[in-house]
Amino acid sequence: MTDTHDTPRTRSLRLGVAGPVGTGKSSVIAMLCRKLNEEFTMGVITNDIYTDEDARFLRSAGVLPSERIRAVETGACPHTAIRDDVTMNLLAVEDLEKDFAPLDIVLVESGGDNLTATFSPALVDAQIFVLDVAGGGDVARKGGPGIARADLLLVNKIDLAEYVEVDVEQMVKDAQSARDGRPVLALSKKMPDTVEALCEWVRQLHAAHSRGVHTPTDPGPMAPHFHATDEGGYEHSHESGDSSGEHAHH
Amino acid sequence: MSARASLTTEHTIDRAGRGVSRVYGLRSQAPLVLRPTHPKSAEPFTRHATNVARVSLTSGAAGPLGGDHFELEVRVGRGSTLVLNEVSATLLLPGARGGLSQMRITITVEDDATLVWLPEPVIAAEHCNHVQDIDVALGTSSRLLMRDELQLGRHREPPGNLTQRIRVRRVGRPLFQQQLTVGPATPKWRSSAVGGGHKSLGTVLVVDPDWGGDPPSARILAHGAAMFPLAGPAVLISALADDTLTTRRLLDRGVAHLGDPWASEAAAAPSA
Amino acid sequence: MTPNAALLLLADGRLPAGGYAHSGGFEPTARLQGLNDAAALEDFLEGRVTTSGFVAAAFAAAACAAAHAGNIGRLGQLDPELDARMPSPAVRAVSRALGRQLLRVITRIHPHPVLATLDPHAHQPTVFGAAAASFDLSPQDAALAVLHETITGPASAAVKVLSLDPYEVHSALARLTGLLDELAVRAAAHALDDPDQLPADASPLLDIAAEHHRSWDVRLFAS
């Protein structure tokens, strides 16, 4: 990376949060900011479909100084903004890192789109994919690049499971089998142990990133016939991650 | 027909020891006639200075016509204040033998000087073919309020061809530059991106060095009117409407948002 | 040999420079003026391309010529001139944001010394011109690429803003190709003008629409 401001001192852990509309991405980000505020200096970039509503929600939640929450407008193309044309987001992240240096973590929230949208490794170092039980118990089994290969899959709002008749255990099990051993966390903001598990995952990721042992991987595009046992899919995602180059850490 | 008119003002001290702005070098050539007038009360936009120079321009009964070449040169000398207005609207007409009519206005406002230029609307009659060039050179501490209103065609009449170029530079650097071309030779001036078929449009440009890098912020005044802070100590108020009265009202509304001293003085000045 | 392929690369809307997020003033204009069909879109595009699009094209041509000549001083004069031609602060901000994004992309995909001489917040036409020069394209190529983007950006946005038949939208674009070629020639003729003589065609309704758009709480596009 040639940009002078992208030095190790100012380079944060860039963590993407993706997932379908209404699964609780903004809430997860608010939760992380609130819980990790004292350990890490954080910033947030939101990607909205319409205007800067998510940024405003987070500002009004008061979890961070409001100037550390910035919105990128994606022109009705939230998937483009995090995947094929990341320039706006990349500049927004770098500006935030520069203006509030040193930041430990920048969270990038994708615009709620669909199951196929994942972050490019040119933009983030790692990504969380958020599902919720209200979306139906079979969503995890259906898979998709985010569900199968994001660094972490969250099954959110598990406190609602009984009302929507979803078997959380089964949903998590389905997710695990779709993810080839990558982590899955069941989450409810009403269950402190699940919140702590999420925070702990972020802490370990940050530690690995700081030590330079974390390598961004790419969930890759939707693979129509992907199966959990398909080693090729796994290898492929590694390749993409390595070839991105830009965010490998020196 | 060709005509040239020019005027210069200077700041001087009168017998009572007060600073006054004085007109000198007033030069008229029919039909461009400049006439000093004497303010009875405080002038608009001049910080209540009573000793300002006031000049009215008359450009004849009708015209310029095709073939006419008019030139007006105004120099507002260091520290002086000039209020320049007009007796009546300008009606652009085609000449008997066709041809282009031209009006070239060159204005210099020196340091610590103020120009308040409030011309009446320019009406582009059918088949006119006119080019208007306005060139303004400002110093670092010059103040300017300049109004410009165009009516595109008389009542129920499409306009002829009109090109208007406005160029304002401050200490040699560009501050505001726009060219508007309307009429049958440029059908796309009616596009929803340009003029949208509005019959009347106008601007007020205000330059106030006291704003520094922080002029009043952008504001929407109506569907077709807004005020814009320029990249410098200046604001442009821009309005499009179906008649000149509405345009004037929208421009005045913008001026009322400029903050002191512009706003309060506008309120006190019926002629603005 | 003319580097035609480089021109296509530069003009391609898929160049990851963030253009997809902008409607070029079409979203607010459609709402403010009640535009609702392909004919209204075409009228908008023609107005935009012959005014602010033409200005941008002439500045891109001038930047391209300056970059070819290694005239860094002249490149630096273009942005203040563009500022003076964009009364709306929203329009200025978008032009500089798009310029910055384009500069970032071109610097990464095709490094060239001239790019390093640009202000990181240079206006889009300035960057476009310098980028075109870095690919050895001509001022007229630079102008054409800018004109192309001037109409294709709002056209793709229009399909999302209104319920338009995409074939009709592209028919309009097809009809405008001749105008684009003609404007590119005219714009390139200004490539060596003194900066203060470069075109300054106004689009007052676009300026006003841009400020309306900034004030909306809900919008699909960033401009």
Image (cartoon, rainbow, N blue to C red):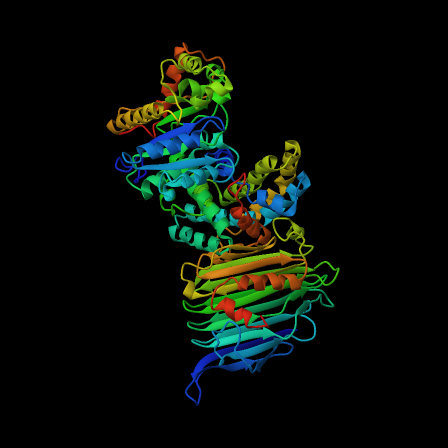
Q: In the rendered image, which quarter contains the N terminus of chain A?
A: top left
Residue B110 visible in this rendered orientation of the protein: yes
**Closest to the observer, B99 or C170:** C170
Screen quadrant of the C terminus of chain A: top left
Q: Position of residue A108 (x, y in %)?
A: 40, 33
Residue A91: x and y in percent read 39, 39
Instruction: Give the quadrant of residue B19.
Output: bottom left
Outermost residue toward the right? Answer: B156
Q: Residue furthest top?
A: A229
Q: Nearer the viewer, residue B187 or A30?
A: A30
Q: Specify whether B63 is left or right of A21.
A: right
Residue at the limit of the structure toward the left, as seen here: A211
From what the image shows, is residue A232 above or below residue C87?
above
Q: Position of residue B216 (x, y in %)?
A: 47, 59
Camera sees residue C136 = no
Q: Residue at x 48, y 12 (%)?
A: A225
In the rendered view, tell whether residue A227 sits above or below residue B139: above
Q: Position of residue B222 (x, y in %)?
A: 59, 55
Q: In the picture shown, does residue C217 fall above or below B110?
A: above
The residue most toward the bottom is: B15
Q: Nearer the viewer, residue C26 or C51?
A: C26
Q: Nearer the viewer, residue B269 or A184?
A: A184
Count of labels in the image: 0
